[in-house]
Image (cartoon, coloured by chain):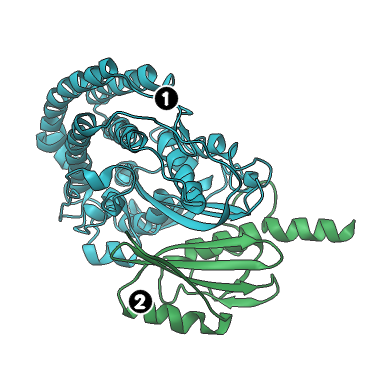
Chain colours: A green, B cyan
Amino acid sequence: MAQQIINTILPDALLAQTQQLKNDGYRLAAISCTSKDDLELTYSFDKDYDLMSLRLHVTPDDAVESISGIYAFAFLYENEIRELFGAKIINISLDFNDNLYKTTVKTPFGVKKKEANDGE
Amino acid sequence: MGNRTIIPFGPQHPVLPEPIHLDLVLDDETVVEAIPSIGYIHRGLEKLVEKKDYLQYTYVAERICGICSFMHGMGYCMSVESIMGVEIPERAAFLRTMWAELSRLQSHFLWMGLLADAFGFESLFMHAWRVRERILDIFEQTTGGRVIFSVCDIGGVRKDANAQALDKILSVMDTLEAETKELTQVFLNDSSVKHRTCGLGMLSGQDAIALGAVGPMARASGVDLDMRKLGYAAYGKLSFEPVVETAGDCYARTAVRIREIFQSIDLIRQCVRLMPEGDVIVKVKGNPDGEYFTRLEQPRGEVIYYSKANGTKFLDRVRVRTPTFANIPALLETLKGCTLADVPVLILTIDPCISCTER
């Protein structure tokens, strides 16, 4: 049975730990975000069908460094998370500037909702 | 240097039924860059988990996509079952595996037809879809549906297949195998087809890994990655090896899918032969509390279902990372250097599902 491990880390440690996983031969499988009291970012990596995840908790105002310098294709996940949840991910290699989602409702969706709630 | 122009490709396109949207930067007729955007069919289905309880969400999950509907429902159910520690009956695991492989078959036949249509081989397109109808008929007979089946539930499956239905499936598999051999002759040996697929959209194994490619896209470049080897459902009891090609071009991606059709036929036969008698569902009590990543091999590649529960009937989060989403960076890379006329064929060889991608 394949393992699933989730390690909670500080945002500052993200790049170093991601680089270490890449050096160890891990493949980036997904980046997920859960919005509750804060934003919970989970970076999932696969090696030999075992899943290793790095987790960090941030607020929408905390800047999180992009890992697209390490895994180039992370740009797609990071742009999406920024637009769906309003996470402040910076230095994305291919930055869509909130234009990945072409919808009539302006992204980022999460931030808009929060502002509306604040105004009530 | 020629004239550089930007051409919007999709979301509406005469060749591609999938509403993919790319901005193609062209130097004369040659693509130098492709920039994706999404949102045309974004429905906020992940967000809907806040409004539908964890049992109701099964119906939402299988509506993420009309082609992989069964496997979406199955992936979601498996993630919740893992959180709750539910062990489904063995017969249900075999039935899920059988329906999953039937889904792979109908998806690959659908894709074969679309590819034939993309390079203008209309009779081949119709032939592939005619064969596909046989699988949809099996779905209708065993589940009652042809697109959305609503047969997967947390704890097992809602419907059983009797001995007569299983015999019928075996009989259809024999017919299907013979018809697929005929189709294979055209797809893999016809000079006009090879002219449109050989050497086009090259992706090396190294690039496939570096760009996060999954499924047939990765396996056609020599990457031996198939989530069925995790042994979920009944796959751990079946004998199979991932189908791998090494050329990394459109022809190799076609060959992988065609070989996977024969593999799926074999897996279905194994399922029917090994399927034990017994119940098909267990009653589930309480609410889930915890989190889990479930990974499945859909027709297009690895899908990841992440569910996070809080002990109430409403989940905190369901996140679906679909194979097409993972394959977009590799697609963008392979498009560079091809001609505009080859773009539809090249896009089709990743078998894009934008409904899955945008959710």
Does residue B223 appear in this view?
yes
Q: Amino acid at mark 1?
A: Lys
Kindly identify the residue that appears in the image at 65 percent across and 40 percent down.
B52
Kindly identify the residue that appears in the image at 27 percent across and 52 percent down.
B226
In the foreground, B285 or B357: B285
Q: Amino acid at mark 2?
A: Lys
Kindly identify the residue that appears in the image at 62 percent across and 59 percent down.
A83
B257 relative position to A55: left or right? left
Eyeballing the image, is B123 above or below B312?
Answer: above
B78 relative position to B344: left or right? right
Q: Which residue does the numbered mark 1 point to in the structure image?
A: B159
Does residue B7 appear in this view?
no
**Quadrant showing the C terminus of chain B:** top right
State the mark number for residue A22.
2
B253 relative position to A56: left or right? left
Eyeballing the image, is A59 above or below B327?
Answer: below
In the foreground, B140 or B230: B230
- Residue B118 lies, in percent from the top left, at 31, 34
Same chain under badges 1 and 2? The reply is no
> Which chain does the numbered disc 2 sit on?
A
